[in-house]
Amino acid sequence: MTLLRRMAALLIAPLAAMLLASCGINAVPTAEELAKAKWADVQNQYQRRADLIPNLVGTVKGYAQQERDVLVEVTNARARATSVNVSPDQLTDPQAMAQFQQAQGALSQSLGRLLLVVERYPDLKSNQNFLALQSQLEGTENRIAIARSDYNEAVRAYNTEIRTFPSIMAARIIYGSKPMVPYQATAPGAERPPEVSFEK
């Protein structure tokens, strides 16, 4: 009898391990952590853009004193954008994500207006500091677009994982998982980076 029990235990242990492995017990947190890491990349790129803006505004200010309204608008939009943060725990909160996206979209629009103002100042367009900042800003906008795309792909994978069998069991019973909110452009034109080309 004990031999039979031992053999049953030896067979049940691997079977239980296979069932647990196939129910998404590891897949759900893995997908969640990947999405959170991709969100950190998005925030990192937005912070890089926010760090560039004071230099850009300072450079333009030296040439375009009469454009104070636009410079103040960009500075205020930057302050609002950097004050709205979304922690990894808030990635399932549509309202928090909407506020973050709106603040970043407003900053993108303000930067677009600032760069249009530059058209009126030919000397500024050839200034080395401005050209370097323009190039960095363009690169940052591209990085932001890539980071948002990577985040959205990770969110898609996570949301699919928590809604499909067998992971749905672990997602609901063990983790209480909720779908994450993908990044969406909220303002007209926010889906495009500010125009930084000065060719006519």
Image: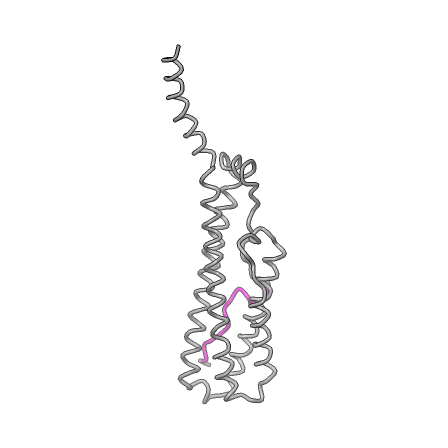
Above or below — where is 180 with respect to 63?
A: above
Quadrant of the rendering where the N terminus is positioned: top left
| Rendered residue at 44%/72% (across/down) | 138
User: Which quadrant holds residue 110?
Assistant: bottom right
Direction right: furthest residue: 95
In the rendered view, tell whether residue 143 sits above or below residue 112: above
Name the one closer to the observer, 24 or 174.
174
Q: Place residue 197 in its image quadrant.
A: bottom left
Nearer to me, 192 or 145: 145
Q: Which residue reaches farthest top?
A: 1
Q: Is residue 157 left or right of residue 71?
A: left
Highlighted magenta segment, given as a residue range: 187-198
In-image side of 34 versus 92 (left or right) = left
Residue 123 lies, in percent from the top left, at 45, 89
Vertical position of residue 191 compared to residue 37: above or below: below
Q: Main secondary structure of the magenta part?
A: loop
Percent across and percent down for residue 24 are 47, 37
- Magenta segment includes 189: yes
Residue at 48%, 61% in the rendered image: 42
- Looking at the image, which residue is at 55% across and 52% down? 89
Residue 172: where, in percent of width, then height? 56, 38
Indicate whether residue 6 is drawn in magenta.
Answer: no
Q: Give x and y (percent) for residue 141.
A: 46, 68
